[in-house]
Image (cartoon, coloured by chain):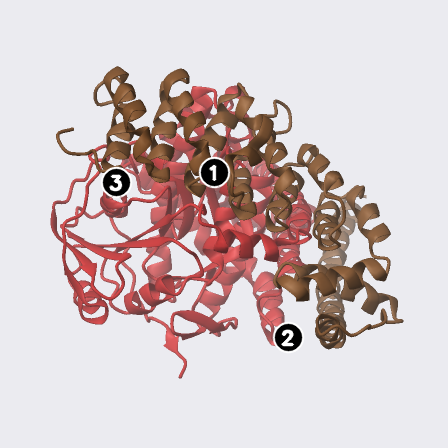
């Protein structure tokens, strides 16, 4: 019994220290992000965007849209892209071996006809292309039909090979960009020659109404699983990435919405076709390449341009997605392990990667083991109650505090959810999350970590799409 | 004692959580009130500004917040209108003493304030020299804002400074911003680049060559042909592209000489061939 009491005591102490470090660091990140967002919002940007829109030298953007069984939302997504407020856009949709009507919908809706496209051979592609088409109504819209090898990265590479503009924007086929999103996200590339990559906020679109490819009303979905993800996205994107970006230590630009200098991506040979976290892999690859070359560069994140994307609405699909993400993160950190803790890789190597290793990858494993120990200690009565109280304070209350701080940053800066009850729903989700979602998430991430260690094969994340609610 | 510490930790974090929730509620209330106030101020000043563009002598609103809103809205509107409307707004801003406010803003500590002040200051139609000096501002976005605003205001005499700012060692302006600003100014002659033509900095040389070509400045031909003969390979390629854009058949001999000297299949070789093609000399290349 004494041994058990000692084990429980010390495991709980370690766990408390772990949670304290994690939550305090996160709250510090929130504070930093809050400052960065406030500074960003103070800029007089409307004239800048007008001038960028009107200028003949504004760089062109190729939007790359990998699609795999996306019949539910592909039409609205392409309409949204065609209606973007940007002077020079090329849209490259890649139908990656869909078994549904994804390609047929595009052909029918946008009058796609066969065409020949110039192909850049610097980027490799595994799945063979069997058709290339161009819209006869919208010359900037092209469709590449290819065999699927089961990986998103191969579809993005296929799009990259036929893209022609100076900047490439990677988005998901179930995503809708705000009309001004490209004008926002292009601005850092214009203002600073050193910028090689930029990302924007991604938020769940579930529950939103769409008209002609535009989100016309946003509300927090009723479904608890989706509602919790809204909170997660606010924490991860608005706060987490803004904070890391302000230190030039951004590890991930979401595959759902990221803009890159095409030449930088070509220099890397495109996306790593074997990576499950191809978006993060690209960003870390860019960091490494630029640092190794000794060139000044910046990877930035903008809190304002929004990309709306459909998130899983069932625990089953969400579990698959999170296991896949965690596996991808594990593989990524293993691949770039040589950068971790090395001063030559700047904030990314010294701070971000160790943080992700400790808290995002190994953290869930520690949490699962720790929680089991605490539960055993509580059940057998060997865990001192004061220590249990401190554990609850460090794990649950500080986590709630971090989530609420993220909601506060959103409220102060953008207030994208206009109804009072939406904010209340977010607050309730923040309070409830540590009591249910956190445990599940830790478990899924632990499974992902194990898969990464075992090098389990994984492919496209299958998701049942509901599509968008079209408003009349 | 151990129980006291645990209790204190729980109470403190719980109190902080409740406090944060109250803060969220407070922010929501304050934000809504501020938005309503701003919407009201905007609705008040917009008709007044339209009266200004109609040539009426509109007094500055008595309420301080409305007066500030009117200045900001006028500065923003100046950039969206042309001709007599623009002049009327600039005159109104000058007459009603917005210049001291703008000058103060140019010296503000916060970069975003300086950027806002640049817009207001140039909207006054005042001497652009203070804004030209801000092409060397310590904040990169303020430098960009200055270049952009000078371009938007069409300040021709600022073109050499904008071009040279690209080559500044410590505080450069990005090439894209400078090029876009110069194109926005739209000089009709290569002479507008002034001393920038003599720069030895390859970044400045490339900018001048590219923008002269993009603007199709026919009187830049001699200088571009000179660059074709004397610069490095990359700049020669840009000069060839610019000559192709200008489209003067008199550039053909210089381009043919450059083709003979260019390394086969290099970027320069491709650019020269493309330029000759644009000049109708593509046959047999």
Nearer to us of marks 3 and 1 is 1
Q: Position of residue A106 (x, y in %)?
A: 22, 66
Return the x and y of residue A107 as percentages of the image width and height.
18, 66
Verify CB contact (< 8 Å) between mark 3 and mark 1: no
Residue drawn at (45%, 24%) of the image: A339
In the rendered image, the quadrant that contains the N terminus of chain A is: top right
Q: Contact (CB < 8 A) between labels 2 and 1?
A: no
The chain under label 3 reads: A
A404 horizontally vs B94: left or right: left
For disc 1, the neighbor class at 10 Å (few under 14, some 14 to 19, many from 20) is many
Chain shaded brown = B
Q: CA distance from mark 2 to mark 1?
A: 34 Å
Q: Which chain is red?
A: A
Residue B280 occupies which quadrant of the picture?
top left
Residue furthest to the front: B250
Q: CA distance from mark 3 to mark 1?
A: 23 Å
Of marks 2 and 1, which one's residue comes earlier in the chain? 1
Task: Find the residue positioned furthest to the bottom.
Answer: A472
Q: Is residue A165 left or right of residue A305?
A: left
Q: Which mark is residue A456?
A: 3
Give the label on residue A420, or none: 2
Q: Which mark is residue A251?
A: 1
The answer for which chain carries disc 2 is A
Regarding mark 2 in the picture, which secondary structure is present there?
helix
Sequence order check, earlier mark of 2 and 3:
2
The percent position of residue B70, horizontal first and vertical second, equals 77, 66
Task: Examine the rendered structure and indicate whether residue B90 appears above or below residue A147.
Answer: below
Q: Earlier in the sequence, mark 3 or mark 1?
A: 1
**Can residue A273 be seen by looking at this rendering?**
no
Q: Is residue A89 left or right of residue A240?
A: left
């Amino acid at each position: 019994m004494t041994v058990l009491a000692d084990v429980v005591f010390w495991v709980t102490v370690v766990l408390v220290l772990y949670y304290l470090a994690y939550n305090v660091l996160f709250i510090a990140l929130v504070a930093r992000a809050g400052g960065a967002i406030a500074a960003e919002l103070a800029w007089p940007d409307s004239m800048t965007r007008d001038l960028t829109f009107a200028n003949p030298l504004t760089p062109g953007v190729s939007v790359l849209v990998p699609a795999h069984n996306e019949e539910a939302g592909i039409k609205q997504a392409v309409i949204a892209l065609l209606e973007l407020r940007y002077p020079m856009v090329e849209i490259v949709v890649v139908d990656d071996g869909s078994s549904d009507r994804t390609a047929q919908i595009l052909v029918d809706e946008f009058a796609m006809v066969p065409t020949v496209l110039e192909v850049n051979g610097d980027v490799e592609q595994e799945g063979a292309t069997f058709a290339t088409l161009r819209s006869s109504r919208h010359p900037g819209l092209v469709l590449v039909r290819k065999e699927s090898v089961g990986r998103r990265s191969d579809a993005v590479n296929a799009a990259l090979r036929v893209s022609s503009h100076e900047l490439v924007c990677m988005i998901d086929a179930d995503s809708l960009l705000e009309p001004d999103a490209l004008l926002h996200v292009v601005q850092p590339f214009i203002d600073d020659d050193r910028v090689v990559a930029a990302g924007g906020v991604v938020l769940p679109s579930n529950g939103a109404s769409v008209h002609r490819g535009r989100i016309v009303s946003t509300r927090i979905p009723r479904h608890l699983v989706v509602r919790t993800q809204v909170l997660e996205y606010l924490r991860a994107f608005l706060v987490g990435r803004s904070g890391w970006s302000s230190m030039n230590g951004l590890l991930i630009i979401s595959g759902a919405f990221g803009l890159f200098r095409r030449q930088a991506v070509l220099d890397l040979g495109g996306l790593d076709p074997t990576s499950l976290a191809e978006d993060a892999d690209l960003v870390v690859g860019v960091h490494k390449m630029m640092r190794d070359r000794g060139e000044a560069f910046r990877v930035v994140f903008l809190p304002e341009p929004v990309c709306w994307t459909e998130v899983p609405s069932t625990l089953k699909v969400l579990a698959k997605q999170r296991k896949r993400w965690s596996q991808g993160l594990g593989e990524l950190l293993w691949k770039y392990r040589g950068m971790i803790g090395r001063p030559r890789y700047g904030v990314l190597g010294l701070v971000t990667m160790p943080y992700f290793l400790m808290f995002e990858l190994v953290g869930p494993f520690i949490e699962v083991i720790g929680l089991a120990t605490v539960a055993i200690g509580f059940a057998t009565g060997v865990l001192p109650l004061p220590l249990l109280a401190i554990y609850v304070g460090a794990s649950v209350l500080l986590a709630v505090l971090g989530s609420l701080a993220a909601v506060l940053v959103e409220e102060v800066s953008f207030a994208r959810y206009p109804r009072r009850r939406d904010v209340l729903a977010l607050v309730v989700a923040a309070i409830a999350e540590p009591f249910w979602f956190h445990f599940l998430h830790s478990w899924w991430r632990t499974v992902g970590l194990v898969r990464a260690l075992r090098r389990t094969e994984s492919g496209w994340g299958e998701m049942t799409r509901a599509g968008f609610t079209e408003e009349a | 004692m151990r129980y006291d510490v645990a209790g204190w930790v729980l109470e403190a974090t719980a109190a902080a959580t409740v406090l944060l929730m109250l803060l969220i509620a407070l922010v929501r209330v304050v934000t809504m009130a501020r938005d309503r106030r701003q919407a009201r101020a905007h609705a008040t000043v917009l008709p007044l500004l339209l009266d200004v563009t109609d040539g009426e002598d509109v007094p500055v609103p008595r309420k301080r917040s409305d007066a500030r809103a009117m200045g900001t809205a006028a500065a923003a509107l100046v950039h969206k209108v042309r001709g007599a409307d623009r002049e009327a707004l600039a005159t109104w801003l000058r007459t009603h003493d917005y210049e001291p406010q703008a000058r103060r803003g140019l010296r503000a500590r916060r970069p975003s304030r300086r950027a806002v002040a640049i817009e207001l200051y140039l909207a006054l139609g005042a001497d652009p020299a203070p804004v030209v000096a801000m092409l060397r501002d310590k904040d990169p976005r303020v430098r960009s804002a200055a270049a952009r605003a000078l371009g938007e205001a069409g300040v021709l005499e600022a073109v050499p400074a904008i071009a040279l700012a690209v080559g500044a060692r410590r505080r450069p302006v990005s090439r894209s911003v400078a090029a876009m600003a110069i194109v926005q100014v739209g000089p009709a002659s290569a002479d507008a680049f002034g001393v920038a033509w003599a720069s030895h900095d390859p970044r400045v040389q490339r900018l001048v060559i590219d923008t002269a070509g993009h603007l199709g400045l026919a009187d830049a031909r001699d200088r571009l042909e000179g660059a074709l003969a004397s610069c490095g390979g990359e700049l020669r390629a840009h000069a060839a592209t610019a000559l192709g854009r200008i489209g003067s058949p008199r550039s053909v001999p210089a381009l043919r000489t450059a083709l003979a000297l260019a390394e086969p299949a290099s970027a320069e070789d491709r650019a020269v061939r493309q330029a000759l093609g644009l000049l109708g000399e593509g046959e047999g290349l």
